[in-house]
Amino acid sequence: MNDVLNIETADITASLRRVFGYPAFRPHQREIIEGLIAGRDAFVLMPTGGGKSLCYQVPALHRRGVALVVSPLISLMKDQVDALRANGVAAAFYNSALGSAEARQVLARLHAHELDLLYISPERLLSGGFLQRLRDIDIALFAIDEAHCVSQWGHDFRREYAQLGVLRTEFPHVPLVALTATADAQTREDIVRVLGLQQAQRYITGFDRPNIRYTVLEKHKPFDQLARFLDGRRGQAGIVYALSRKRVEEIAAKLRDTGLRAAAYHAGLPGEQRQTTQEAFLRDELQVVVATVAFGMGIDKPNVRFVVHYDLPKNIEGYYQETGRAGRDGLPAEALLLHGAQDAGTSRRFIEAIENPEQRRIELHKLNAMIGLAESVSCRRRVLLNYFGERLEKDCGNCDVCLDPPAQFDASVDAQKALSCIYRVGQRFGMGHVVDVLRGADKERIRALGHQALSTYGVGSDKSEQEWTSLIRQLIHHGYVTQDIANYSVLQLTEAARPLLRGEQRLQLAKPRIREQGRKKRPKLDAGLGSYDESLFEQLRALRKRLADEQGVPPYIVFGDATLVQMARDKPLDEGALLAVVGVGQHKLEKYGHDFLDAITEYCMANGERGVEMEPALRDTWLAYQDGLDLDAIASRRGLPLTQAAEQLLRLMALGQPVAPERLIAVKKYQLIEAALTRLGADADLATLRGALPAFVADHEVALVRAAW
Ligand code: ADP
Ligand code: ZN
């Protein structure tokens, strides 16, 4: 059993702090954890990066016995186990990746009751008498990760998962939690039915990933667009998705030519090479992976800062899953989509070739929804969430449309020019040729066709190629023009074009966007933490990389980006101040605290900066609080009167430390004070509040609760 925590005395907030170094729970985590500890089942639907793991990891520490975590993604197990061990938790995994000696060792530890968590593949769990084995062991809980794999409806059905219902029947007294990021209603019902979770409490968090900024650019010279985008993001990790293997390799090679650490990843490459690429990416040695959709299933690198779609994805589901790989750590991240009309045409052709008419219809519908998102002139997040059946209260303020609403212009005359040009070339040519004629291009093909003699030849020489392309694309989108997919994508007019052509109707269109707008608005990694010292951040990052390499783990196992950002902002100079940083728990403090404090101290001295130091008295109180003690216990450990202990806690709050008064005083009193504050307002003076409260509530208790308000 792990020794970082005394299960008898600690409350779950204390283990959140001490073991994981986090100041507070995210929405739903507390209820889920408390329910599991009390022995109740749960069904958890949370978006990627929402913090599902903690929901079973904390109860694993608070219940007797070992928690079994079933996961289909073998490559993720090692990461999870490494991350837990880095926090001092006794964890192991058991799957086909282990050699037989290692496997025996894991089983020995299991039987010796040495493990808090065991990650296991469904195959191993269900075969070789493993369930029989479990009868002799205390089991804290079962967690079924990626639970959507039980459903045939889901996109990721696994045969073994369908048999996991046996856990509910064979171990009726062990709480079971199923977790997934997949929302579809049918899949949800399947999970509940197959796993026997009818009694389970359901926790469903919204789909939104507010830290991801969605941007769409009209595709034009895409490699240059990509290069410009990457230019502003040196050193940040990202994924570029493209649809074909050939394109993936080309882009990766060109990026390497520009001096970037980039590699290609697709299913056609040798397994070994894919493995190496994936690992180098996890270890922050590669900056960019250019990949087909095959990349990403088995990785959950938390600090992917951007995902670029070089080609239009086939549907919103895929797009959302791929963009969701950015910003799992909750820090600002970006999703850039390059949208070209041609890509849509190619995808459409593929879909037209599908034999089954029903499937063809569905795929076409999904593609159209994707195009609708790409061409949306209203908030992208609204369109996205709407697709998943969720409504956004107000525009998100963190997408390209919100940040920089597209300018409209009166396109009536330009539209007339384009429409009549399409008409003049006999409705027998595609976009490229029509634009050439409009712009009066001097081309062999035009002369050969005699199109230089048309009345519309050169009438649009005042506009660039991309402006015309954008305009025609919008005409298609608005239904004035169709593109005949079956016939080389030739452009043809629809009935709706008539009044426009005759000048009887006016038309407003959006100005095209080819360059990223509002560069200055690029999100920084500060995540609402305020500004931080970027050069210190870089130094801490280098230190993290060195320590990670020494231990053979990915850098984020040492500390996440959010932790380094906060260190670079607060510049903690001693253990107390360092413990207040998110992601620094007791175990990591002991293991890495020294190195990081040294680096920060050195940096501050070299640059004449002031860091944050706590005076020793305050620090000891803070440490006692971190240990999960309440006010009485803190005062007695510190040998202080209650009022003085409370005063120190107030000062800690004033210093910005996350002190939660509900943990310090009796629940009953806390509720009374809170009710009084709600009634009288936080501005009410102490005497008024006192007057509204019974005598057994002490002044310092009122002060603590009020300060936290
Ligand atoms: P999911 O499995 O839902 O995709 P994870 O469990 O991997 O997400 O959590 C995503 C990230 O958020 C991890 O880095 C995790 O440590 C962090 N995290 C989870 N819960 C909290 C919390 N209460 N406070 C701060 N960070 C958290
Ligand atoms: Zn928006």
Image: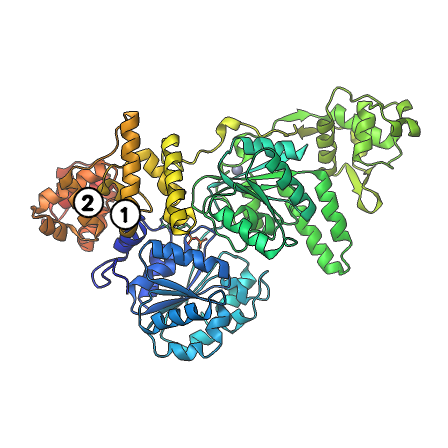
Q: Position of residue 147 (x, y in %)?
A: 49, 63
- Looking at the picture, tell me which residue is in the foreground, 608 or 67: 608
What residue is disc 1 on?
589
Q: Quadrant of residue 708?
A: top left
Q: How is the image coloured?
A: rainbow
Which residue is at a point 75% across and 19% down the rendered structure image?
462
Which residue is at a point 34% across and 35% down the rendered structure image?
568
Vertical comparison of 11 with 535: above or below: below
| Secondary structure at numbered mark 1 | helix
What residue is disc 2 on?
622
Q: Position of residue 134 (x, y in %)?
A: 38, 76
Q: CA distance from mark 2 to mark 1?
A: 15 Å
* Whether the residue under disc 2 has CB within 8 Å of ligand 1: no
| Secondary structure at numbered mark 2 | helix
Q: Quadrant of residue 594?
A: top left
Which residue is at a point 85% across and 26% down the rendered structure image?
443
Which residue is at a point 13% across and 41% down the rendered structure image?
617
- Looking at the picture, tell me which residue is in the foreground, 522 or 388: 522
Q: Is residue 389 visible?
A: no
Q: Position of residue 167 (x, y in %)?
A: 44, 74
What is the three-letter code of the residue carrying label 2? Trp
Q: Residues within 10 Å of mark 1 (few under 14, many from 20)?
A: many
Q: Quadrant of residue 427?
A: top right
